Amino acid sequence: MKQKLLAVLIDPDKFDENNASGFLSNLPEVTTHIFVGGSVVAEGRTCEVVKILKDITELPVILFPGDHSQISGHADALLFLSLISGRNPEYLIEQQVKSVKKIKNTQLEIIPTGYILIDGGKKCSVHKVSNTIPLSQDDIENIVNTALAGQYSGKKLIYLEAGSGAETHVSEEIIRSVKSALEIPLIVGGGIRSTTQLQNAYNAGADLVVIGTAFENGSFRE
């Protein structure tokens, strides 16, 4: 993955379909993907939003589901997430098993993804819903080893997540250390609110950066 990629994350429950075209027109020109998902989303809402997005944009729409109910065959691909930083079997394998009925009859591209929750300075929704403890930003060795365990177990992507609305984004030192150890692409998200922070993440080794809350509330700084 040579090109640096940018994904904007849309929470279906916060998406205003009446202003969908306006929202998309305000995205940075360098946006390459749209992620759709949230920790908790009303039943059927993800599918509604994906359908709307597919009608008005040619950008790839990728599912970033909080659970198996957020799967829509209308999307282009699915990040098949396993929360490898936690030890709750519900998010290590059980949600994945529950999703199979929906996935196997779709044309979705399935992308096995090792999801690593990093302490972003506040208790985020992933922390609350999954009942798992984020990894400390000070324990870089553990973060690197967790990422490598994901790679060795067959994941195609590693996703470092500081959480929605994080006070502290994943540090450049962590990104650099993880990227230097991996042979697969690295995604980084959570707490990035400016083009400077975005560029710093790229410079440290992130292949794809995800921005969500900063676009939702209009606080992203060019």
Image (tube, grey):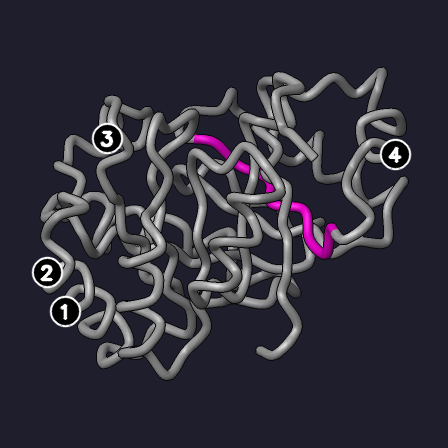
Name the residue that disc number 4 marks. Answer: 25
Label 2, label 3: how far apart the Cα atoms are: 18 Å
User: How dense is the environment of label 3, judged by Cα within 10 Å: few (below 14), some, or many (20 and up)?
Assistant: some
Query: In this rendering, does residue 45 appear at all?
Result: no
Helix, strand, or loop for circle 3? helix
Q: Which mark is residue 145?
A: 1
The residue type indicated by label 4 comes to Ser
Is residue 113 rendered to the left or right of residue 91? Answer: right
Q: Position of residue 108 (x, y in %)?
A: 62, 62
Helix, strand, or loop for circle 1? helix
Q: Are marks 4 and 1 in contact (CB under 8 Å)?
A: no
Helix, strand, or loop for circle 2? helix
The residue type indicated by label 3 comes to His
Query: Hey, which quadrant is residue 167 in on the image?
Result: top left
Name the residue that disc number 3 marks. Answer: 127
Is residue 102 rendered to the left or right of residue 126? Answer: right
Label tally: 4
Q: Residue at x 36, y 34 (%)?
A: 163
Q: Are marks 2 and 1 in contact (CB under 8 Å)?
A: yes
Q: Residue at x 84, y 19 (%)?
A: 19
**Residue interval drawn in magenta:** 31-38
User: How dense is the environment of label 1, judged by Cα within 10 Å: few (below 14), some, or many (20 and up)?
Assistant: some
Label 3, label 1: how far apart the Cα atoms are: 20 Å
Q: Residue at x 33, y 39 (%)?
A: 162
Label 4, label 1: how far apart the Cα atoms are: 40 Å
Q: Residue at x 76, y 53 (%)?
A: 30
- Quarter placement of the C terminus: top right
- Quarter placement of the N terminus: bottom right
Q: Which mark is residue 142?
A: 2
